[in-house]
Each structure stands twice: as C-alpha cells, then as structure tokens.
Image (cartoon, grey):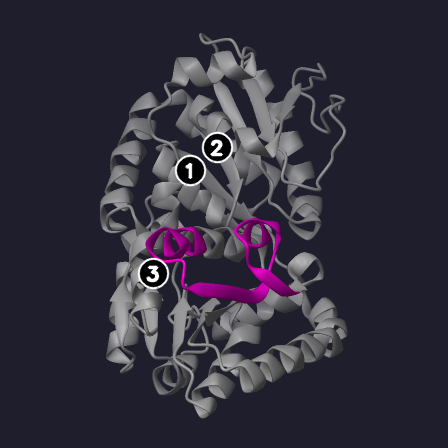
Amino acid sequence: MQKILIVAGEPSGDLHASEVVKQIRHKSSAFEFYGMGGELMEATGVKLIYHIEDSAVMGISEVLTAIPRFAQKRAKLKRFLREQRPSVIMLVDFSGFNLNLAKFAHRLGCPVVYYIPPKAWAWRPSRARTVAQTVSAVAAIFPFEADFYRQAGAPTHFVGHPLLDIVPTTETVAGARAQLGLDPERPVVGLMPGSRRREVNPLLPVMREVANRLCYRFPDCQFVLPLAPGITISTKPTRSMHQLNDSPFSATITTVDSTQVYTAMRASDLMIIASGTATLEAALVGTPMIIIYKFSALTWWLSQRLVQLTHSGLPNIIAGEEIVPELLQDQANVERVTTAAEDLLANPEQRVTQQQRLATIRQQLGASGAATRVADLVLSYTEH
C-alpha cells in the first residue's frame, strides 16, 4: 500500500488537510496516511507521527524557545521520509517548518505538493525561489498568489479557497438572531478580538470600552462575542472609563461558543474584528466590519520594514484597495474605533456599500471544491 505524508502545524492546516484526506479516501483506498497534524486529521485515519497541540507559537521569545522542539519533530519526519519513501508529501501552510522539509524531500526525489504556500507575496519574497526549486506543485488559494508563484517559476495551480466550502451563506439575519436569543429589531455589533490570548489581551479592553461608548450613542445596541477555543473572559459588564453628561454607562456582551461564530457574524450589523482569517470569513458571510490589530513593538517595527503590503486585512489585500476600515497599532484606540463604528451604524448606506464590495471577494476566490482539486493534484503524483 502506498504511503502519503501530510504535514500541518496549526489547527487551520489540520482542518484543511483533513478535508483533502477525505477526498482522497473517497477516490481510492490504496493509500496509508502518515503525518503531523491534529484531531481532525487523526479522525480521518492519518497515523500521526506528531500531534500539533504544542506547535502553535507566536512572538519572538516563543519561537526561540520552540526551536529545539521543532528540530526534534523535523528530524523524525525526515527519518520517516528517508526510511519509508512515501509516494508524495503534502505540506499545508506552516512555512517556517515546512520549507525545510520541502528541501529535504526534493533531495530524496519525493514529490512535494504545497497546499497554502508561504505568503512570500507579503514578506520575504526570496522564499518563492525556494518553493520553485523544491516543490513539485503549488496549490494556491488566492488568484494573486497563483500569479505570484507562476512568475517565480513554480508549477502552480489555483485551487480556490477552502473557506468557500466551510462558511455558510444561506442563514438569514432573523434566523441567526433567533438562534442567539437576540432581539431582531435592535442593532447588533459583533466583537472578535482574536483566537490567541496574545491577540485578545490588548484588543478586548478596547472593544469593551468601544461597546460602552456605543451604548451611549445607540442605547438599544446589542453585542455578541464568539469565543475562540481555549479563550475565556468575564461576561460581567464593565463600567465605562468615559462619562458623558456625568452619566456612567456599560454594555452587556453576550458570549457564544466558537461553533456559532458564523451565526454571530450573520446576526451582526457590524463586526469589530481582529485582523486574520476571521476577516475573510466575515467577508464571505457578507457582514460589514472594522479591522483592528495591535502587534508587539518588535513585530510592528519589523513589519514596517519587511512586509510588502499596503493593507493588513485579507478583504483589502484581495480587493487591492481599502474596502474595509483598518485601524492598526496606535490607531486601534478607543476613540478611533468608536468613531468608525458610529459612522457605520448611523449610516446604513455605508454598510450596504461595503457589503456590495465584499460580495466581489467571493467571486475572486474561485469555485468551491478546493479539497477535491488538491486531492486530484496529490493523486497525480502517485501510482494509482
């Protein structure tokens, strides 16, 4: 039986890899799957060499302390490649780890399919040359990403974005609000401060205070906060740091489980959301948003010098212009975010305009069925 090695280092990669495995199994039973991944890959029958539960790191200090652990994992995966000689290896995102494996597999003559390749179009463009020299096929998820890698000389296939098969688009606003117990006649603002504690810690206080101030301008406003897995917060209302007309005010924020994130997005008139994949999910749902983010001082300093993008939010990157307000670093303060939110809540026509422009994002991401196309690509490098 032929072997396929799959390497994903983060929960999102685990999800997307598991969908590809399902499609391959649907097409053929002639393969054994091995790899590094999580519970979703394991549930599809992948025999895990390593579990990703301790693979996600953020920040310079975390990366440095994780180096020995990653080196050990990489060494074991290389040993598997050398001794077991799988028919093909599929790498999923996680470029800091996976590019080294791509080089090693290439030297062994093992075909490499890279699904969700390094974001060399954003920073460190030299990585595109490494990909072109070592990867058999790039499975790009953005049209501009496919163009970028083709120009770098890499054999590239635009497979579409996997979120197109995940994000629901049929739920109504009224249905979503009913599910969450929200009043259908009152405005709803969704708050998403991120999926990692390092993101939540600086952004949640800003969002709480913005909610408090919006309550003064829009007394009937409701707030919903989908909690990322592993993140807990106090649901007790906090008194505003700001008083108008000598009257303190506070917002009650309804928290919902992470499984209801798309329902919360659909229920919202406006999302205040941390930069990241969630911004693209909100765009696919069609919810107007404001993107905010606070980086560490070192990361911000480096990004100003290394990142080759004008925008931070994925909807704006895909559109090639700012269709969604972005407030980053020092601009992600209570006053600026409150003003932007008030403008959108007070002007429905601005929200409609943003929704119309967000609708074009879905069209640019190709057709659904990314996992099926990647499965076909992987199978093309096997004897079946």
**Residue at horizontal 38%, vertical 57%?**
24
Q: Along the line of sight, which residue is nearer the eye, 291 or 359?
A: 359
The nearer-to-camera label among 2 and 3 is 3
**Residue at horizontal 51%, vertical 64%?**
33
Residue 137 placement: quadrant: bottom left
**Residue at horizontal 51%, vertical 36%?**
272
Sort mark 3 into few (<14), some (14-19) or many (20+) by Cα contacts within 10 Å: many
Residue at which label 1 appears: 282
Q: Which mark is residue 374?
A: 3
Residue at which label 2 appears: 271
Q: Which element is circle 3 on?
A: helix
Is residue 365 inside the magenta stretch? no
Q: Which residues are magenta?
A: 20-49
**Residue at horizontal 34%, vertical 79%?**
136
- In three-dimensional space, the C-alpha distance between marks 2 and 3, rounded to whole angstroms, equals 32 Å
Going from N to C along the chain, the mark reached first, 2 or 3, is: 2
Q: Which element is circle 1 on?
A: helix
Q: Is residue 330 left or right of residue 125?
A: right
